[in-house]
Image: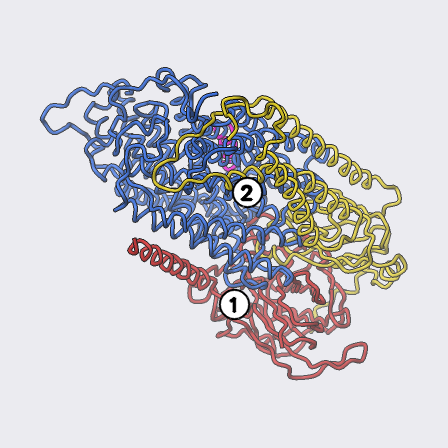
Chain colours: A red, B yellow, C blue
Amino acid sequence: MNKRIFAALATVVLGFGVIAGIGTYVAAAKNDPGVTVAEAADSYTAPDGTVYPQVKLSLNVYPNSLFGGHHGAGGGAHPDYVSYGLGGPNGEVLSDAQTGTNFQVPAHTAVTITVYQYDSGETLNNDYFAHVRGTADGKATFVQRWDTKAKSNASTEQQITNIPADMVGHTFTIHGISDKKSQLFVSVPLMMSNDEEVGAAEEEGGYTQFPTKTTFTFITGDEGEYVWNCEFPCGDGTIARFGAAMSTMGYMSGHFIVKG
Amino acid sequence: MPDTNTPYFTGQWWKRKDVKRHAVLWVILTAFIGYVGTEVQVRAMGAPASETMENVINLMRIFTWAASPVAAFAAAIAIGALMGKRHYGDNPPPESEHAIRNSPRAIALWIVVSALMCLFALVVGLIALQKDDARLLDAKAIHINVVGQQWAWNYDYPGSAGVRSEVLHLPVDQPVVFHVTSKDVKHSFWLVQLGVKIDANPGQFTETSVTPNKIGTFDIRCAELCGLLHAYMQNKVIVESKADYEAWLASQPDTGKTTWVEEKAAA
Amino acid sequence: MTTMMERPTPTSGDAPKVGIIRHLNVFTAFAVGALTAIIVWRLSLALLPADSESAPLFTREDKITLLSMIGWFVGFMTGIGALVAPFRWVMGKDLSHDENMFLAGKDMGTKRYFRYTTDHKVVGIQYLVITMVIFGIGGILAMLIRANLGTPEGGWIHPQAYNSIVGTHGIIMIVGTIIMVTGPFGNYIMPIMIGARDMAFPRLNALSFWLIVAAAIPLIWGQFIGGISTGWSAYNPLAGQAPLGMNGYIMFICIFALSTMVAGANITTTVVRMRAKGMTWNRTPIFIYGVVASVALALPAFPVFFLSQVMSGMDRALGTSFYDTARGGSGWLYENLFWIMGHPEVYVILIPAVAALMEMAPVFTRRPLFSFNVAVMGIAGICGLSVLVWAHHMYISGWAPLLNAPFMLTTELISIPTGMLFLVLIGTLWRGRLWMTVPTMSIFALLWNFMIGGVTGIYLSDVPADAFLHGSMYVTAHFHYTLMGAGLTGALAALVYWFPKMTGRMLDKKLSWISFWLVQIGFNVAFIGMFLVGLQGQPRRVEAYAAIFNKGNLVTSIGAATIMTGMLVLLAAVIGSWRSGVKAPMNPWQAKSLEWTVPNPVPLENFETLPVVTEDVYGYGRKN
């Protein structure tokens, strides 16, 4: 009889071991690109005069995921998916970039994000997202042609509150779970690039030299876990074009953690 | 032990000891199940923020109290059986001293009672349903369009100067009719503390209505699995006084206009 | 074939003449299946044209996936030998007597469990094992869900992987619970219980089992190509948008639906045609009614499920638009088709489990079943009403608000026949002398769990209350109370009860008691916690949630781990007792039904002489 009890205990231990093993495998299969932690480096004066510490993030949006160290390059998964990625301070394509779709920023801080958009675009399915929402001044700073070689504006810089809904490349939209805390909601449309995009960073005739550049600043509230995603339907060949790249974390969506 | 070869429920059967024991158990359990069942559930549901939600809470109370005598009856008999003679061992106990295969009176009573309870539940439900449906036709109601898409909600306010928002603003004590649709897959628009939910279907408009009666900030959650970030398809509804609501509407930029002008390709 | 099996002609001393089927078993099936799948995959990869860039849907990869899965299916069924007899029949010759005996598993030892064996007892054991495997996988997935919900922010696994695990847990547990009673006990016990030598169609019996094995592979395959990220209901148009793994779900359902149709026709025919002499409908045990009701209810339900998935597959692979609103289809069409299957299906699960406990109640209270007629009426009433209630899953879908009231009526009416089943159970318990065994306590557990499941069902049947509760964790807790708290409890009791007949050994008493209490306590802790977060407003199928739900989810996770522990203890008890348990007497429970009149182990054709029945099986106690 004692042998039976022992066997039962062994089964329980073994069973939970199997569960832990499978869990570890499934968790590892997430293929998480890791979290980019932004540190306060500067200060920002909001329109109401309050001064906040400021962090800066520089992102690129590519027509495919062949730009660097994580996804499509080197034969990884889904080279044909559109993808966000960490970029250099002037929109450079970083050959060693992890995808950079998970971010961590401090609470009660001004976050300034600059997005260089290398992809073309079409019409949004909901023009709500053609408007700038939730930034500190209600606006975004926009340059239609940014010269990545000269590292300067190739067209005039302007303040925008919205862009035509049929010229959107992608959007950067942060939202979260409704709880007792203040909610962060930021959505900024990213104008399409006029130059047709092809290839990968390292190829001949790779990404365009003139991406669009959009800069915006928002103030974070209390600590919290948010997500961001693109609200432009760019998962081609799927229902409502929200499958494929749009439904896989690390391409057009990621975590946005407000902490510390 | 009473003579088991005569039918059980004859003579003054209600004076039998085990019948009395079961009856006492039944009454106690009815009170216990009814009280605990309603209190635990109603507390978990939190404070209602609309008459619709108050109705839902009332329905939960009514149904729990209506069901508790039935549940308590089954529980009393089950507990009574467990408290009776129990037999342990590898061989069966001797067979029962009685072999009641049928009791037409008990069966008829059971079926009649359950049919009446069913009728009661139906009537209560229809009255509540009627109230909800009537609100949809309220001429005083304001109308708000709700658009769900993967994975965010947004609202527009017909009659305003093109105001749209991602946080829902509602004036208190004002009937509102929602016209809900989706841009892609199915979502479900759930105003949690207001007790209202309706699916957002692509290409179709569905309607629901509510009259918020408390000022405060409440939750909106998507209640239909809609893909990758379904868990994050949430935001808030802010119920405010009529004046605050009007002020908020006026403070919103006129989003109908565009501030962007096309640039001639610069040198 | 049946007559041949009833009167076996004596074989000569020579080795039996058995053709190709001698060489076919589960290994050849897997090999041929895999090979066919690979060939079809390479061919379709080479031959199918590329998608046009401007096409609204890219269908090439779906075509390749579905074709490969169909290749697997055809290859597997060929490799197991399912096609041998039909092929011979088309050629004008049937199987020889030796071949039929070989198929029946005569003198084959354990090898017969890995073959296309037609003996109902072998099929029953096969079903028992595959049910345990299914519950094992489903349980592991449940634990992964609970682990991910350990913290509000989730994110331990990829959200789509989480959605996929939720969906796979759902569908695999639904399938597991559908077959958990009618599979093992409906196949092993039922024919003996009605005094038959085998099922009406033994080859269909083998077919229904091996179809489930064939179906399992596409579902597992799907997990590695994106998973089924839609939940078990696979609502369109989300299912049209989902990754390639969705094709695995579609194939799985199509093949499984075939299996239930085949099994349903077979079991129904067996019960209607093959009951022993004297076993009138009034003397037929209530468990038989439960099994027949279950499979007969599946007969109209599953073809609809099959069709809904064929259309879903066409939308994905051929670019049709049955369900795509943007191109003229309707998601409501899918919802209707799905729930026309989906609501009868919960009674497919529930009825045989409750009927099994009603069968055991007289044995363990040593008194007759209280009002057999009410039990039959209850089962019939549930069957009749259950096909008329499907749209209560769609109260808030906006499909037909005007139909909400009529569907509320039918849904609430179903509480009357359900109440009849309660009456039968408590009537049998009333003043009975309890023989305290796990099945006895399971009756009490069922009353408790099914009462909670039933009463919460009343709230959900009410349209205004449902407008708050629908799509929340409350619904999840509710159907776990009915399918697991009531259904699985009945199936586990059936396992303890019939284990001695099926294996010839008693199930370890101490371990089965430990398991019973762990499972029941863990279950109630887990799902009462889930009711509470549902009432607080936590939606279903979320991988992250607001911090206020943290406590309730923690309680649920602790409860779930307790259930898992209990189920693992039961697994140890089953394996240990099967190998080296106490040898069971022929009739350990001193029950009166026919399956206890045959010796252990049950001989190939069950009865040497077919029994004649003169009274029902509930003749306990003194008559009055």
Q: How many marks?
A: 2
Q: Residue at x 69, y 77 (%)?
A: A109
Q: Residue furthest bottom?
A: A42
- Circle on res. C448: 2
Q: Residue at x 63, y 51 (%)?
A: C534
Estimate the x, y position of residue C186 in percent, counting from the top left.
39, 31
Residue B149 included in the magenta stretch of the image: no
Q: Residue furthest right?
A: B243
Q: Residue furthest left?
A: C13
Estimate the x, y position of residue A76 in percent, counting from the top left.
44, 63
- What is the secondary structure assignment of the residue under circle 1? loop
The answer to which of C264 and C566 lies nearer the viewer is: C566
Residue C303 included in the magenta stretch of the image: yes
In the rendered structure, the residue with mark 1 lies on which chain? A
Residue type at mark 2: give it: Trp
Residue type at mark 1: give it: Gly
- Vertical relation: B211 (above or below) C155: above
Which image quarter holds the C terminus of chain A?
bottom right
- Circle on res. C243: none
Q: Image quadrant of residue B25?
A: top right
Whether labels 1 and 2 share one chain: no
Whole-angstrom CA distance, mark 1 to mark 2, is 71 Å
Q: Is residue B167 left or right of residue C176?
A: right
Estimate the x, y position of residue C493 in percent, counting from the top left.
42, 40
- Vertical relation: A52 (above or below) C43: below
Question: Is residue C251 visible to us here?
Answer: no
Q: Residues within 10 Å of mark 2 (few under 14, many from 20)?
A: many
Q: Residue at x 44, y 51 (%)?
A: C139
- Circle on res. A205: 1
Q: Nearer the viewer, mark 1 or mark 2?
A: 2
